[in-house]
Every structure is written in C-alpha cells, then in structure tokens.
Image: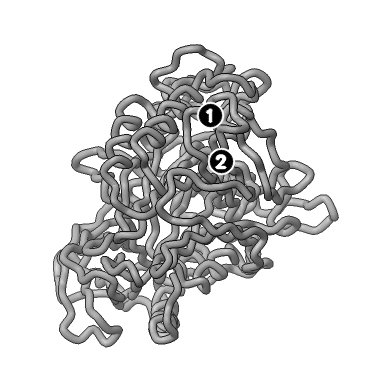
Amino acid sequence: MAQGPGRAVNRRSLLHGAAAGTAALALPGVAGVTEARAASRVAGAPALARAGRPGAPWGVQAGDVTASSGLVWVRSDRPARMIVQTAATESFRNARTWHGPLLGPGTDFTGTTALHGLPSGEQIHYRVVLADPHDHRRTGEPVTGTFRTASDRRRDGVRFTWSGDLAGQGWGINPDLGGYRIYEEMRRRDPDFFLCSGDNIYADNPIEASVRLPDGRIWRNVTTEEKSKVAETLAEYRGAFRYNLLDANLRRFNAQVPTVIQWDDHEVRNNWYPGQILDDARYTEKNVDVLAARSLRAFREYFPIRTLRSDRGGRVYRVLRHGPLLDVFVLDMRTYRNANSPNRQPDDRQGVLGAEQLAWLKRSLARSRAVWKVIAADLPLGLVVADGKTDFEAVAQGDPGAPLGRELQIAELLRFIKHRRVTGTVWLTTDVHYTSAQHYDPSRAAFKDFAPFWEFVSGPLNAGGFPAVPLDGTFGPAQPFVKAPQRANVSPAENPQFFGEVDIDGDSGELTVRLRQDDGQVLFRKVLQPGRVGQPGS
C-alpha cells in the first residue's frame, strides 16, 4: 500500500517492541538441537514468562483480516485460558477484552479468538494473555502483535505479498544463514497481509542435521524429533507445523503481518490426491485420506482460518474481502481433485476443484464488486507439472490442443468469467520453486472463448529451487519473464528465494505486480489497468 510516513513509522515503532515480546526461540548455534531444548530456554526466560505461569514462546499471529474482523492465534506451553485485548494504541488505554478458548492437549495447546466489530482501515494493537485455568490471577507475560483492518476507503490503497514452499527438500532453518531471512525482507515491505499459496510445511521431507552442498560447504539445520521422519501421526504433523515457528524471522513477521493461508500437497505428501494408496516404504499408513485428515486437523490448529472450525469441520476455500479495491479468492486445488493421470480424458466434471467449489467460485466472482479479483491458486494453470513418467499433477498436460482432462474445468471457468464480464481477475500461485509471469491470450490459444489474463508465480520461501517447466499452449500462454536455476533442488544458500508483491493504488486503481528475490531486488514489474475484462500482453 502507498503509505504516508506517519503510518509506516507508527507500525514499525510498535513492532520493535512487539518483536521483543515475541522474539521467543533464540536459534541455537549448532545444528541438531532439539525443539524441546530451544523452547525450554525461552519458556524460562524472565522477559517472556513468569515461573510456573503459562507462556507463549511460539509467538502470535493474525489471519483472515477483513474491514471489521480478524482472528488471533496463540500456542501455550501448558493448559491455559486465552484472553485477547485490543486497543487503538500500543499503550492499550481503553482496551477491549475478548475471552478466548481454553487451550489444552486436544488442540495441541493452540487456540484462536475471533475479533468482530473492529474499525475499518485502522491499526489494531493486540496482546494475548494466557491465564492459569484454575486461577485466573496467575497469568503469563502478554505477547503483543498488530494488524491493520481492510479499509473501506478506496483512496487508502492495498499492498500485500505472496509466496509459498517452506522448509522443502530438507532445507530447514539454517542458523548460519540467519534462518528464514525472506520473512524479514517481506516484513520491511510493510504489507497489509501475506498470502501463503501452499506448502507451508513439507510433511514428507525430513530435516537432517546437516547436508553437504555441491561446492563442499555444509548446510546445517535446526532439527526436531518430529521432523526426523515423514509425518504420519497427528503428533508428527503438529510437529511439522510447529517446526517453522522456531524461526525468529517468521515470528516477528507473524506479529506484524496478518496471513491468508491455503494448503497444497506437501501439507500431507507430495502430489497426493483423495483415495490414493501409497506405494512408499517410508510410510506405515498407506491410506492418504487418513494422512490428509490428520494433517488438516493440525493445519486447522496452527493457522487462523475462519472457514475451518473444529466443531464444524469446514473448508479451506474462501473469499477474503479487502475493501472496495480487492477480493481474494482462496482456492483448494487439492482436496476435491480427481486422481493424477495422463489427464487427457475428453470429459472431466470433477477436475482439480470439484463441482461444488467451482460453482462457489463462479457465484462469488459474479457477486464481487471489488475492482480487482485475485484468484489465489495453489497450482499454476499453463505450466506442465508432471507426476512421474505418464501422469500430471497440475492442470496442464503438455498437449497444446483443445482442453482435455482438468483443463476442461478451467476452460469452463474462463468462459464464465468472459461471458459474465467479470473484470480485474489476476491469478497468483507458487508450487514450481521459481518465479515467472505468464500472459494468457485467446489469439495464441487452441481454446479461444476467454478474455486475456495474467498469472504470476513466486516462490519458494525456503526450499530447493528447480528448473523451469514447459508451457502448455491450450490457453495461449506467453512468458515474458522467468528466473529459475538450471539444476534441480538448488539450496537456498546457492539460489535466491522469491516472493511477489502487489500494490493497488487508491487513486488510479492500477495494480502493480513486482516479482522480488529475498534481498528485495525487483526482478520483474507489471502494471495492470482497472475495469477491463482482459489485460494486454507485455
């Protein structure tokens, strides 16, 4: 968001104190230290918790923030009652108190409190207090954070970042490199929110204490017991989500920037689909539906998502309204898909979204009055992502002709967007572990009944880099920009990590996409104009 100096300075000055309050788990100086040891250091630190009182060394985070509401998350180190206080200033004068849930082993001591009736377009300061469930006077030190509600004033503009793919291919928290440094760079950008496009964990990628790089250097990881093998049990999935919160950069980021979270395959296992039976010796549980249910429970426990509730089950796909300029349509291209296959069937009603989610997406797009409709996809549309020698993982399968397989569902959606004259659609994704920009145009396509649009790819946050994959010509993509390594699984020590940034100007309504690498350098920039069904090419 284009922000005046006063707002930026105020937020940053607050977060200097907030980061101190949540600076939680000091990363160890040697690889192989366990999470329990690291957490115990923090839980016993006088500045963070009183002896014998509940503490929150994993920090706080906010999520699914709208113009009047938001969710606040915390994890306690013991049974506790969650209490949240909100105020307009960091002094917490005239604070409002919200009584949250009782945190216990049933949710791995995590909990989320919903905040409603918040003022639009304002900085919300919050602090989480954990109270002994048997004696409410015994409380731990407050843990503070902040977020800005979406503005109902168009002139305020919007800024957000997106990326995905964290701790993949065995590249975990490396203290020699300063941990997940990309989060500190994104925090400096001061976004209104962060869209994580999936693969928040790599449940199928164990983290070893050290890895030798091709040049002879040693990559060292912080390790935990749960991340020493593939995740199968609920405890192991919980441990995989908890692992990332050992990183101080991520905790500081969470205390400042609210998140919009979606999931993809590695939350469960590489390239999974419903009904799959695994042929993988690492797993004793072969039924992927059992694994997915365990992972979804842990996912719900560790992220504040308003459509996922423990008492109702819920769903990951949803729309987040961010004032008059932006609606974000968060897809789930994993839970409702059909099996991976050669993807050339002439009729495919289930596709990658499932019939119910597709109908929801059409209704929601048609009802949207936002200037821009960002479709947050956890998989790319026209990039050919293979699953083995004959099957395909995403939408495209490399046949440049008329739509087949999962492409049929996307063609139906794109046709709907054109004929209902839904303007301002932009697709954002990650998954392929490099960054690129694709412009889709019917003049180049085998399928022509759609309006031109852009798709932008950015990632990983902290995972192996991979070479660029081919384009599929069905929807006429052109790729004016791509940056990818030349070999597979290049470590974050050898290859930049990537995130994208979107700025929507409150006066002109222009949407600017910047593809950045982890040091903040802008690699590619594209400005899109509002109020158009399609957008021109490069």
> Which is closer to the viewer, label 2 or label 1?
1
**Residue nearest the observer in this picture, 465 or 349:** 349
Residue 330 percent across, percent down from the top left: 38, 45
Query: Taking 82 as reference, is 215 above or below it?
Result: above
Name the residue located 71 percent from the left edge and 51 percent from the top edge: 483
Query: Furthest-top residue in view?
Result: 346
The residue lying toward the viewer, choosing from 82 and 333, is 333
Residue at the spot of label 1: 395
Q: Position of residue 124 (x, y in %)?
A: 28, 74
Q: Amino acid at mark 2?
A: Lys
With 524 as the anchor, is 140 left or right in this view?
Answer: left
Residue 160: image location, x then y, percent? 45, 62
The amino acid marked with disc number 1 is: Val
Q: Is residue 371 visible?
A: yes
Q: Secondary structure at mark 2?
A: loop
482 horizontally vs 88: left or right: right
To which residue does mark 2 refer? 229
Q: Is residue 109 visible?
A: no
**Residue shown at 54% from the left, 25% from the top:** 447
- For the image shown, how many numbered marks are present on the structure? 2
Whole-Å distance between the Cαs marked 2 and 1?
30 Å
Q: Quadrant of residue 88?
A: bottom left
**Residue 444: which disc?**
none
Q: Residue at x 30, y 78 (%)?
A: 141
Q: Quadrant of the N terminus?
A: bottom left
